[in-house]
Amino acid sequence: MLSTLTHTALPDQAKLQAICKAVAVLDALNSPEYEYRYYSYNKDWAEGEEVFEMQDGEGDQMLILFRAQGCVINGYAFEYEETDKRQLTRGLPDVFDEFIFGEPVNSIGTTFCIWYTPKDKWQIGQLEIDEDGSENFLDIFDGNPQTYIDWASEYYDEDQEKPAPSLEAVTSVYQGKTLIKELALAIVPHVEDWQQLEKDLQEIGYPYDFS
């Protein structure tokens, strides 16, 4: 189980970024309405910065900033008490300060923070408690397509007649293969608005060909 206590087991930046884009694509298919989407990705967050976001609509939220110099994960689990943010971020490279101490992260809150640089790999600050809810956020990054399928089957279970996505199709997205219509329809039985899906994929920065 991935958490702050097992942070060194997280995939490196390139693999993490690929997983983030994959689950954002899968959620764009499963949840066409952006406001209800659990996972999203914006390749044009700011100049030289890309951001992955998780929000459950009930208070839990996670943002991951990707830069050339590395990446940083900010998580907020509303059921867990916030501790001293300066302690959680002790040793944080200066390049991440504006993101972690600015908006919107400052308003969201921080219950855990993990960062990665090519030189030092995954690092954390000083933990004041052993439980911070991070395992509920980080397990999706294990690189196993079945993990997303199991999560989505439970999260989107209000549609009982919706078939589970093909493991082969989800694996193809995890591998970064170009999304064609046949592949999309192996993940969800129907795509209502292909143009909107194109816009979503452009925002994510994921290859597609619907011709």
Image: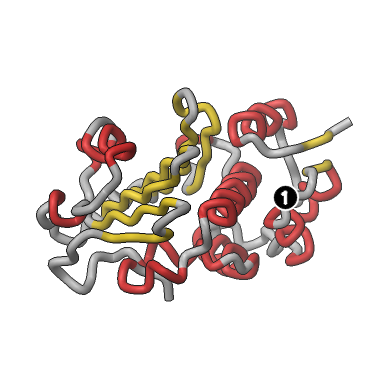
The residue sitting at 59% across, 65% down in the picture is 143
Residue count near mark 1 (Cα–Cα under 10 Å), binned few <14, some 14–19, many ≥20:
some
Q: Farthest left residue?
A: 84
**Left-right relation of 104 to 67:** left
**Left-right relation of 61 to 46:** left
- Above or below residue 45? Residue 149 is below
Quadrant of the image for the N terminus?
bottom left
The residue sitting at 63% across, 69% down in the picture is 146
Whole-percent x, y for residue 68 in the image:
49, 38
**What number of labels is visible?**
1
- Above or below residue 147? Residue 50 is above
Whole-percent x, y for residue 133 in the image:
29, 65
**Left-right relation of 29 to 111:** right
Q: Farthest front residue?
A: 119
Q: In the image, what residue type sits under mark 1?
A: Gly
Whole-percent x, y for residue 88 in the image:
19, 56
The residue sitting at 77% across, 37% down in the picture is 208
Quarter where residue 191 is shown: top right
Quadrant of the image for the C terminus?
top right
Residue to which mark 1 is pinned: 176
Secondary structure at badge 1 equals: loop
Q: How is the image coloured?
A: secondary structure
- The residue lying toward the viewer, choosing from 155 and 28, is 28
